[in-house]
Image (spheres, rainbow, N blue to C red):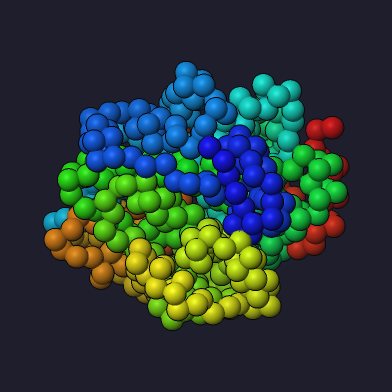
Amino acid sequence: MRYISTRGQAPILSFEDAMLSGLARDGGLYVPESVPQMSAADIRALNGLSYEEVAFRVMRPFVGDSFTDETFADLIARAYAGFGHNARAPLVQLAPNHFLLELFHGPTLAFKDFAMQLIGQLFQEALGRRGERVTIVGATSGDTGSAAIEAFRGLDNVDVFILYPHGRVSEVQRRQMTTPTESNVHALAVDGTFDDCQARLKDMFNHFEFRDRVRLAGVNSINWARVLAQVVYYFSSAVSLGAPDRRVSFTVPTGNFGDIFAGYIAKRMGLPIDRLVVATNQNDILHRCLSGGEYRTSEVHPSISPSMDIEVSSNFERALFDAYGRDGGAVAQLMAELKAGGFAVSQGALQALREHFDSGRVSEEETLATITVAQKTMGELLCPHSAIGVKVAEDLRNPAVPMVTLATAHPAKFPDAVEKASGIRPPLPNRMADLYERPERVTRVANDLSALETLIEERRTK
C-alpha cells in the first residue's frame, strides 16, 4: 500500500512513513494511491463481530506490511481497552429511522479518542522498532489536543506539544490538556484562533530545517492514520442497521472535514452510504462552499460549539483532490489561492462533491433549541456539536433511509451550554470527577512561528 500527496510533488511513502511524517513535504496531505475494496460478502461478514475485529478487517488493507497481523491486532486491542462502553461506538435511536452514534466513550469523552488512542499505540510500536524519537506538534480547537495528550502522555519515544487558541476552548477541554503531569506533554495557549494555530503548525512542517532537526511529526487530522481509524465506525454502525443490504446515510458535525472524509473513504471502499451530510455552526465555510461553490475564508466567530470554530478546513483538500481528478497541480494552485483569501470550485469539481455531500448550517439559537427538544422528546442530552448534527439531520434526512448522526462529544465537556438549554448540568464520569481540582500546567505563547519553534526546541527531550 503506497501513499501519495494531494499536491503531487512529495515522495511516495509506505503507511508507516506517511503516518510518522504527517504532512507531506510539498505541503499536501497523504492519501492512499488506491482505495481497497470490500465486497458485499466482506461487509456482511462484519455482522456480530466486536468493534476491534471490525477495525482490524477494515483497516488492515491500508497498512500493508508496516505491521504484522498479530502486532496490528494487538495494538487495536490495547487502543480500545480503556473505553467506557463494551460496544465502543453504540447506536441509540432518536426517532423513526434516525440514530445517534455515541462516539464519546473514550478516555477524553470525544470522537478523537478512536483515532488518537490507536495512533499512540502505532507510533510507540514503530518508533520503538526503529530506535527513534519524534516531536509531535498538534493544533486543536479543543478535542484533538486532549485526545493526543491522553494518548501519548508518558510514552518513551515522543514529546508532545499542543497548540490551542487561548480563551476559545471549554474549561473541560482546557483542563484535559493542562492537568496531565507527565514531562513529555506540553499545552501551549496561543494568542489567536484555531486557524492561527493550524497555520503555525503547517509553517513548522514547511520549515524543513526545523522539521528535520526536531524530527517533527503530526497527529492532527492531516495525518492519514487519523482518518483511517475513523473509517471503522461507519462500517460498524451501518452493518448494525442492515448494510450492505440496506443503504445508510450519515450526518457529521464537522469543522475540519476529517471525520466526514472518513465516511467518504468508507463509501469508496464499498459501504452502501446514501448521503454524507456536513453539519456546520455559524463558522460555515464548508456549507457556503458546497451550496455556493466559493471557498473563501472570513472571520472566525467564537461559539458554544468551539471545536467547529474553523474557517480553514484542512481535510477538504483531500476531497478536492478526488473532485479534481487527482490532479495535484490543480490542488496546489487552489491552496495557493486560499492563502490570498479563497477560490472558486470549478463546476465539474463542485458537481463531483455534491454527488456525495449535502450540508446545513445551524445558528447558536437553533443549537440551544435542539438541545432542549432532544432532551424533552428523545430522552437524549446532547453536546452542542452533536445538537448541530441532529438539527441538520432532521432537516435534510430522507425518512425512508436510516440516518446516523455522529455524537462527537460527551455533554459534560460543554456543561455551560448544555445547562443553559436543558437546565441540567451534566456531570463528568467518575474517573475524571476531580478534573476541576487538579493543578494546571500551561504556557501562553504569542501567535509567532519563531517564538513557538524556540520554545519547542528548549523543552523537547534531546
User: Residue 231: horizontal and vertical position, in percent?
Assistant: 41, 44
Image quarter of residue 38: top left
- Locate the C terminus and report the quarter of the image it occupies: top right
Give the residue displayed 34% in from the left and 67% down from the top.
Answer: 355
Q: Nearer the viewer, residue 218 or 243?
A: 243
Foreground: 150 or 139?
139
Residue at coordinates 27% horizontally, 28% vertically from top-left?
Answer: 49
301 sits left or right of 329 in the view: left
Q: Please indicate whether residue 230 sits to the left or right of residue 92 in the image.
A: right
Instruction: Name which residue lies at 48% across and 46% down.
Output: 34
Residue 252 visible? The answer is yes
In this picture, residue 262 sits left or right of residue 40: right
Q: Position of residue 292 (x, y in %)?
A: 44, 81
Quarter-wise, where is residue 254 in the image? bottom left
The x and y percentages for residue 312 are: 58, 67
Compared to residue 120, the image places residue 334 above or below, namely below
Q: Residue at x 60, y 37 (%)?
A: 14
The image shows residue 313, relative to residue 20, as above or below, that is below
Judge whether 443 appears above or below 62 on screen: below
State the image coordinates of residue 351 (x, y, percent, origin top left): 39, 73
Quadrant of res 53: top left
Q: Nearer the viewer, residue 444 or 395?
A: 395
In this view, 338 is above or below 23: below
Query: Quick check: 221 left or right of 369?
Result: right
Residue 147 visible in the displayed image: no
